[in-house]
Amino acid sequence: MRNVLIVDDEPSLLISIESGFEGQQDRFKIHTAGNGEEALDILSSTEIDLVITDLQMPVVDGFELLAAMSVKYPNIPNIVMSAFGTPKIEDQLKSLGTIQFLDKPLDFDALEECILKALTTLDEQKGSIAGLSLANFMQLIEAEQKTCTLTVFNNSAGKGAVHFSDGKILDAQTGDLQADAAVIEMVTWDNVKIALQELVIDESEKKITSELMLLLMEGARVKDENEASISSFDEILKSFDQLESDNEEDSDTKTDGGYMAGLKEILKEMADEMDGVLSIQVTGMDGITVAVHNPTGADVDAFSAKFAMVMKLIDRSVGDLSNLGDFEENLVQSQNAWILTRFVGENYYVGIVVSRDGTLGNVRLVAGKYQEKLRKAL
């Protein structure tokens, strides 16, 4: 039996919903609460599968309820009931396809359809579906013209704050980032916890220069880009976890015209001075390998193309952090190998893959020793 909690401050509406769904007991059971405080009491004592809440309520409103759920019940999906004020705002929210909401006054057929769809998704995923994201939450703040400060927590990324006045975003901070950049960064965070409080800055201190919708769209784009890079990076690690079981024949007989003989000799010299080299190569930032020494015979072409994208991302990310200097070296540890990369010119990097049985300090020392020699050869 699935349990659905509906939260609204109109007693007549709750009575109508309870009586209207009385015959649905074989599919789901309706629980009701008159405000966020009552809802939290029910959540603490009953296993609730779905929460449907109004936003404007006394005592503890829907925003505070959703914020509290992000901390205590992050995996319980939620649907928002609200009259968003203008068709324009409603169309914007619908166009993003991210917020599940029901128009008020409530249509009972639409409510039933929404409940059944959400519960079907829960069954199909054999667990839970995500609750409200930070981007969704900020959209609701804007739509309901609320004045508040959001404190945002993420276990790995840290803490931040976003400030609103009458639904207009004023400023934001996280770490060293301020204003627009801070909002975009926080939108990329997953599994956030949100705390809601009164506005803690002066309303005249507006530093945000872009509309909220544009910031959310940019944050979504950056998040997608990061996830694509991570996915490619995972494939890289998997490919090198297979290196020790790959063909042990030397593939240095390859004589493709794109390989530079001089560079190849340098790479072989480097490998001779290192312990446990599985592959060593020079690759352009276009993803094309120009020279390789590959004693294990591994397929490094796919790795090269994907790692070039990762290198660009890391270089740009380090460049965005102040007072850290230029990006010099990247080190990745997979289950069976170390992967060390260094730029050897503006458009090329050297990638060295070494067995975990090798000596990492020796590899880094040799890589630094030959860096200038490689740069001159290019």
Image (tube, rainbow, N blue to C red):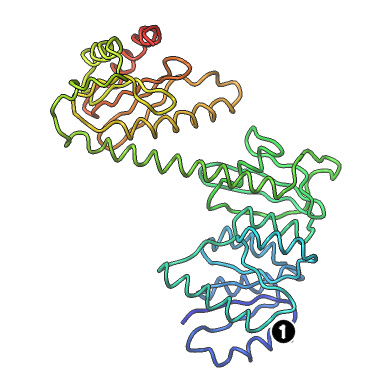
Q: Is residue 296 above or below residue 207?
A: above
> How many tags in the picture?
1
Residue in the foreground of this view, choosing between 225 and 359: 225
Instruction: Say few, some or many: other residues with alpha carbon within 10 Å of mark 1 (under 14 / 14 to 19 / 20 or more).
Output: few
Residue, disc 1: 13
Is the residue 42 above or below the residue 98 in the image?
below
Q: Which residue appears farthest toward the front when viewing the image?
A: 257
Secondary element at tag 1: helix
Q: Residue furthest left?
A: 249
Q: Residue furthest right?
A: 204
Q: Quadrant of the C terminus?
A: top left
* Residue in view at x 79 percent, y 50 percent: 168
What is the quadrant of residue 160 in the picture?
A: top right
Classify residue 12 as left or right of residue 249: right
x, y percent for residue 21: 59, 88
| Residue at the (58%, 59%) spot, across then down | 70
Q: Nearer the viewer, residue 349 or 332?
A: 349
> Which residue sits at x=23%, y=28%?
355
Which percent across, then down, holds residue 73? 54, 63
Q: Quadrant of residue 18?
A: bottom right
Q: Nearer the viewer, residue 316 or 298?
A: 298
Q: Position of residue 364 (x, y in %)?
A: 34, 17
| Residue 111, horizontal then vertical, whole percent | 62, 79
Q: Is residue 346 above or below residue 297?
A: above
- Identity of the amino acid at label 1? Leu
Q: Seen in the image, is 208 located left or right of residue 242?
A: right
Image check: 146 left or right of 122? right
